[in-house]
Amino acid sequence: NFPLTGAKANFGTMDWLSIQMAYAKFGVEEVGGRPIRFVIEDNRGDPATGKSAFEKLTILDEVDVVLGGYTSSVGVTQAAAANDLKVPFLICNSSKDAITMEGWEWVFSGARVPASHYADAMWGFVDGVLIPGGVSKVALFYEMSDWGTSSAEALRANFEDRGIELVYDEPYDSDAIDHKPMLAAVKAAKPDMVMAVSYLMDASLIARQAGELRLDVLCFMGQAGGYTMPEFVVNAGENANYVLTTANWSPLAAWEGELA
């Protein structure tokens, strides 16, 4: 079950298509002599809808395992439901660390990176390029859901460990359409680097509005999410130029097993 409609539909559709591609590629049609059958439900990125979707899949459709979640808020709700109903739940993407720290025996991590490790690959770049290049002050802003706040907690600690000063550190509403007051405050703080945790539509708006305000920094870094989506480049236009992002995976990575 994934968000197939609503604001997070791009991400949920991507996950669902990825599962179908993997199923077609690896050709596993049955497990233990039982044919694999997919039943899809739309959780709309909403915790209450996600709980209902999980209950329908397990009680009415009688599935053996549930994959999905996407947003951390939905993942938390569905993980609790999985433990109550004693149905295996394989989490895709929901990254809040606490989801797998509750001791829930029916909850497992699938294609998921905990929020505290989302930016692991970035720190070598920070240490080897950004700090020598003059980055000593960072502005951190993040959407205020479970993903954004848990990501910010880890980012904050890593910047502080490196002696990088946090000159701005605030959450924001991802449904807002005007981010200019926040961005003006960021600009006034005079950071060398911006670190942003955003979904797709807010990432696109932030990039465009940052361009309008001429928020010029040595490095504008996104924490995956919306900054990794093809639609971000389309929506943000020329303001997507020079925006960097962390990512959980890339088809260009030469790591062993990257196609799996």
Image: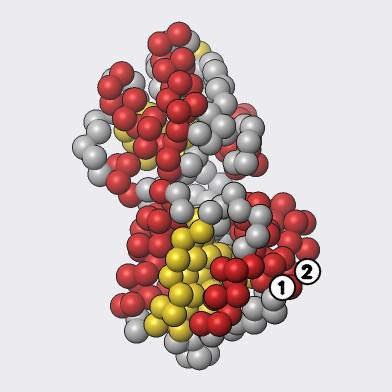
Work out whether 111 lies above or below 223.
above
Q: Residue furthest top?
A: 60
Q: Amino acid at mark 2?
A: Glu
Q: Residue at x 56, y 47 (%)?
A: 259
Lower sequence index among marks 1 and 2: 1
Q: Amino acid at mark 1?
A: Gly
Q: Which residue is mark 1?
A: 211
Circle 1 crowding by C-alpha within 10 Å: few under 14, some 14–19, many from 20:
some
Circle 2 crowding by C-alpha within 10 Å: few under 14, some 14–19, many from 20:
few
Q: Is residue 41 something one can see in this rendering?
A: yes
In terms of image quadrants, where is residue 76?
top left
Q: What is the x, y in percent for residue 250?
A: 58, 56
Work out whether 202 lies above or below 74.
below
Q: Is residue 125 something one can see in this rendering?
A: no
Q: How far apart in space, not on screen, are marks 1 and 2 (Cα)?
A: 9 Å
Circles 1 and 2, Cβ within 8 Å, touching? The answer is: yes
Q: What is the x, y in percent for residue 233?
A: 73, 59
In terms of image quadrants, where is residue 190?
bottom right
Q: What is the x, y in percent for residue 46?
A: 50, 34
Q: Residue furthest left?
A: 103
Work out whether 3 lies above or below 232.
above
Left or right: 29 as drawn, with respect to 240: left
In terms of image quadrants, where is residue 202?
bottom right
Q: Residue at x 62, y 41 (%)?
A: 7
- Identify which residue, 35 or 171, lies in the foreground: 171
Q: What is the x, y in percent for residue 59?
A: 40, 11
